[in-house]
Image: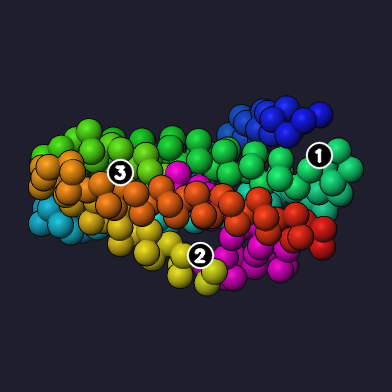
Amino acid sequence: MNLFRQVNVLLQKEIRLEWRSKYALNGILLYVVSTVFVCYQAFKSVHPVIWNALFWIILLFTAINAIAKSFTQESKGRHLYYYTLVSAQAVILSKIIYNMLLMLLLAAVAFFSYSTIFKNEIGDPTLYFITILIGSISFGTTLTMVSGISAKAGSNGTLMAILSFPVLIPVIIVLIKLSKNAMDGLERSVSYDEIGVLLAINLIVITVSLLLFPYIWKD
């Protein structure tokens, strides 16, 4: 099979497994909604800057909880079986695409519940949605690779947090700045630099994943 077909087959497998064990997805969705509700009960009303930062913090920890299981939920025997059938690039690409789709779903649920329960005005909703889209992709790409590394190091959740935060902190800073521009309703040309930085980070992470993961997978 060529790379595209391998990725397609593995992606369908990921979606089917998640659909059969809906408790994992339902648990994450419950975590998102309950976290938003707790924040609302704690603060009731906050400054727009804090509202924006709080949303990205919620989404960040949701992403870590959702993607941490990407490699740890599969046995060593299954990984060995994949090793005989498909390439390492197909495995990591299918994981990245699946986690990106998962993060888009979770981000949509988080934003809907957050903006409904914890209301606040957004000057440029379209740009804010674009920011959420790029942010979800960034979380999916970065955490997938970190999850693969931590799984090979003994499935240590603490290690994943240690490895992911130095990479995600710059992403979070740029996302908060970009989304604040959207909330303030600034001209979109002001935000082009931040969008370019985020797209460049995603491209670099995907490229590094394709180059590095085959060596990790062989171990």
Query: Which secondary structure, mark 2?
Result: helix
Mark 2 → mark 1, Cα distance in angstroms:
27 Å
Q: Residues within 10 Å of mark 2 (few under 14, many from 20)?
A: many
| Pointer 2 with pointer 1, Cβ within 8 A | no
Residue 159 is inside the magenta segment: yes
Q: Position of residue 80 (x, y in %)?
A: 86, 49
Q: Position of residue 138 (x, y in %)?
A: 44, 49
The segment highlighted magenta reads 137-161
Q: Earlier in the sequence, mark 2 or mark 3?
A: 3
What residue appears at the point 34 percent right and 59 percent down from the top-left corner? 172
Query: Which secondary structure, mark 3?
Result: helix
What residue appears at the point 17 percent right and 49 percent down from the top-left corner? 190
Question: Pointer 2: what residue?
Answer: 164
Q: Residues within 10 Å of mark 3 (few under 14, many from 20)?
A: many
Question: Pointer 3: what residue?
Answer: 131
| Pointer 2 with pointer 3, Cβ within 8 A | no
**Closer to viewer: mark 2 or mark 1:** 1
Amino acid type at mark 3? Thr
Residue 36 visible somewhere in the drawing: no
Mark 2 → mark 3, Cα distance in angstroms:
20 Å
Amino acid type at mark 1? Val
Amino acid type at mark 2? Ser
Question: Pointer 1: what residue?
Answer: 86
Which is the main secondary structure of the residues drawn in magenta? Answer: helix
Q: Position of residue 66 (x, y in %)?
A: 52, 49
What residue appears at the point 46 percent right and 65 percent down from the top-left corner? 167
Mark 3 → mark 1, Cα distance in angstroms:
34 Å
Q: Is residue 117 left or right of residue 130?
A: left
